[in-house]
Image (spheres, coloured by chain):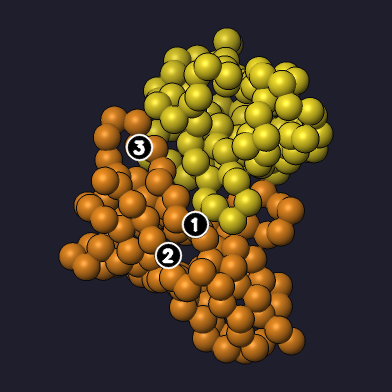
Amino acid sequence: EAGVAQSPRYKIIEKRQSVAFWCNPISGHATLYWYQQILGQGPKLLIQFQNNGVVDDSQLPKDRFSAERLKGVDSTLKIQPAKLEDSAVYLCASSFGLAETQYFGPGTRLLVL
Amino acid sequence: KNEVEQSPQNLTAQEGEFITINCSYSVGISALHWLQQHPGGGIVSLFMLSSGKKKHGRLIATINIQEKHSSLHITASHPRDSAVYICAAHFGGSNYKLTFGKGTLLTVNP
């Protein structure tokens, strides 16, 4: 069974630029999560989708971050404009349903200069 | 406030030693996860438990609901066990989102 796919794996941008990350969850998984993990900390949930609907985006900085999962399958997370403090690993995870085991992708490492 | 605390932050052991990593949480939970993250790698789910004990190979996870505490044990540790171990809790609510601890960096020396 294929795992959660993410791209790109690494990205370096300058502050105020835009960046987008892509995630393809495990086939059949209804729930998709985007996490931000700053070095030395645990992951922080940015947004959670159930199919193509948003379940929780309470910690998403909506003035600069946006995410969509239009067809309820793959998802994109965008940052516009980026700030230095956005440097982190962005992890995508999926699960069959709520409260099920989450499967994580390899993450995208973002460096904002 | 929903919080998850892990200890120790860093742990160094010799190959073969028995290892314990602790996790405590602030209020009642519906489930607790233990996850493993290798340097530069993704995160792998090790256990999800809501009561009692689970075992997989050399890994054992226990939870005490009354004391709001969980432990992850590794028996006969090996250098390949070196990783960050993260505890995460479902505090309930309709979205079942996870709140993560900061992780414990384990280094097992040969």
* Relative to B18, residue B98 above or below: above
Q: Which residue is mark 3?
A: B96
Residue topped by disc 1:
B102
Q: Chain of mark 3?
A: B
Q: Amino acid at mark 2?
A: Gln
Q: Which callout, 2 or 1, points at the residue further toward the start of the chain? A: 2
Residue at the (55%, 37%) spot, across then down = A35
Name the chain under label 1.
B
Q: Nearer the viewer, residue A74 or B105?
A: B105
Res. A1 image quadrant: top right
Label 2, secondary structure: give it.
Answer: strand
Label drawn at residue B6: 2
Mark in the foreground, 2 or 3: 2
Q: Residue lying furthest left in this view? A: B66
Chain letter for yellow, please: A
Q: Secondary structure at mark 1?
A: loop
Note whether B38 is above or below A54 in the view shown: below
Q: Which of marks 3 and 1 precedes in the sequence? A: 3
Instruction: Give the drawing colour for chain B.
Output: orange
The amino acid pointed to by label 1 is Lys
Are both tags, 1 and 3, on one chain? yes
- Is mark 2 in CB contact (under 8 Å) with mark 3? no
Q: Position of residue A41 (x, y in %)?
A: 54, 52
Q: CA distance from mark 2 to mark 3?
A: 20 Å
